[in-house]
Image (cartoon, helix red, strand yellow):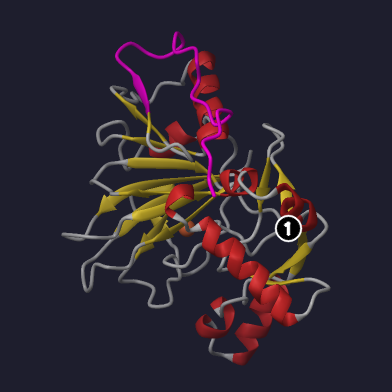
Amino acid sequence: MFTPNPSLRLVSDHAALPAGTRISQIRPALGATISGFRFDGKPLSEDFRAVLRDLLHNRGLVVFEPGTVTAENFTAFAGFLGEFFHYAGPHTPRAPENPDATTIDSTRDKHLRNHIWHADGGFRADAPAFTALFAHQLPEQGGDTMYSNATWVYENLDPLFAAYLETLTVIQSADATGHITDRYLDPAEAAQARQKMPPFEMPLVRTHPVTGRKWIAVNESYVAYIKGVSRVMSQNLLGILFDMIKSPEATVRFTWTQGALAIWDNRVVQHKGIKDYGGGRRILYRATMTA
Ligand SMILES: [Fe+2]
């Protein structure tokens, strides 16, 4: 089904990289690793920012080895991408070391749904363009994150099927899989949350504002149904697309090490945490940014 796409490229000109910095590809569908770079807190050069943005737009996911940044300064580093955009609620408090970061703590939130494929903030029409995650505390084993490139999925569709999908829109909802129902047990609070996060309509196929490439904009957490088709049609079409999004060809599995940083284009790359660490504690610090 899948064929390599040469347009998913690495930057060709590495001349703008700081001395000792190396870039390598993770998988054909997505991902790049940057190693040999240490962020000293000083503003990045325009050239390096351009390389990082280009990598993110073209590879979707960029990961940095431990030691590149710290819990205190990873947000200053990630700030090269855009303005911080906090949409966090009571379940994701600010990180103690860093007011620009929120905490994703496996022991704090029993309704944490980060193990279902999603885009961060996908319950909002103005979901953040980029997410940065810093590994603060990891369980002894497990807790990897899966990433999928929905541009890759679109570009490997049968063209007739892709053309049909482009005629469709989807209804996205914070409560598509019970985020509100399960979390807000008080009816008044649930009603308030639903008012604050109402369902909205989006095209099923969307176009990246920078690369102009299309992607399949559905995810398991926040897409409720395809508008204007039968329930059976909606469920089955979404099932096909969800299967393609989580196929091995479209994905990469990232194993965290403490101090590692991952940044991704939250529009075209979706993700899920792998919940295989039992009672272990996994704390990631997150910053989300506009374009
Ligand atoms: Fe997430």
- Residue 135 position (above or below residue 116): above
- Is residue 10 visible from the viewing direction of this image? yes
Q: Which residue is mark 1?
A: 204
Q: Which residues are magenta?
A: 1-24
* Residue 166 % position (x, y): 79, 53
In-front residue for pair 100/11: 11
The three-letter amino acid code for the residue at tag 1 is Leu
Q: Secondary structure at mark 1?
A: loop
Give left or right: position of 174 versus 1: right
Image coordinates of residue 285 in percent, x first then y, are 38, 51
Residue at left 33%, top 23%? Answer: 40
Residue at 44% across / 39% down in the picture? 75
Question: Is 154 covered by the magenta stretch?
Answer: no
Coordinates of residue 284 in the picture (x, y in percent): 34, 54
Residue 162 placement, left or right of 281: right
Give the camera-side residue of 20 and 186.
Answer: 20
